[in-house]
Image (spheres, rainbow, N blue to C red):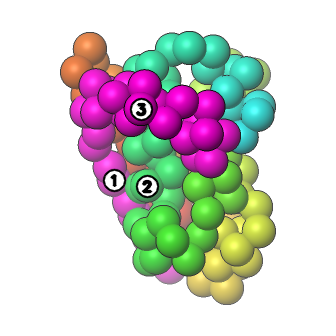
Amino acid sequence: MLRTGIDLIEIARLQSAIERHGARLLERVFTPQELAEVGGNMASLAARFAAKEAVSKALGTGIGPIAWREIEILRGPDREPLLILHGAAKGLAEEHGLHSWSISLSHTHTYAVAVVVATD
């Protein structure tokens, strides 16, 4: 089985949402470790937001049946993005037989994008 997901977000749109909702939004969407790794880098936050959307698309659900924080995007030893699934997201991946994930993040000053590929 092969599944893919992609998402693009305007960085300013996420920044506006954070300015309106503050820590409540950050804590609802991102894990403490994600926030610690990214600091205040809005482009990196936006790329992780896009990655969570892309993963949910690859799982075939979108956000809703799975929670934002069940999809965690961390940095590996060479600062490469690593995907860690928790809870319902992990269960759904196992149900679909998806065990191998590849994730790519990128951003400009305006946009952030994420692409994920999952296979069995």
Dot in front, 2 or 1: 2
Count residues near mark 2 (Cα–Cα under 10 Å), then give few for <14, some for 14-19, many for 20+. many
Going by the numbered disc 3, the residue's amino acid type is Arg
For discs 3 and 2, the disc positioned in front in the rendered view: 3
Dot 1 amino acid type: Ile
Image position, residue 18 (x, y; %) = 45, 30
Image: 83 above or below 62: above
Q: Which residue is at the front of the view, 86 or 64?
A: 64
Alpha carbons under labels 3 and 2: distance apart: 21 Å
Mark 2: amino acid: Glu
120 or 8: nearer the viewer: 8
Q: Residue furthest bottom?
A: 95
State which quadrant residue 97 falls in. Answer: bottom right
Q: Earlier in the sequence, mark 2 or mark 1?
A: 1
Q: Position of residue 67 (x, y in %)?
A: 61, 63
Q: Which residue is mark 2?
A: 53
At which x and y percent is residue 111?
26, 28
Q: Is residue 12 magenta?
A: yes
Q: Are marks 1 and 3 in contact (CB under 8 Å)?
A: no
- Per the model, the C-alpha gap separating discs 2 and 1 is 8 Å
Residue at 28% x, 25% y: name it: 12
Q: Residues within 10 Å of mark 3 (few under 14, many from 20)?
A: few
Q: Nearer the viewer, mark 1 or mark 3?
A: 3
Q: Check disc 3 and report the residue beneath it.
A: 20
For the point 56% across and 77% down, the residue is: 65
Mark 1 falls on what kind of element? strand
User: Dot 1 corresponds to which residue?
Assistant: 6
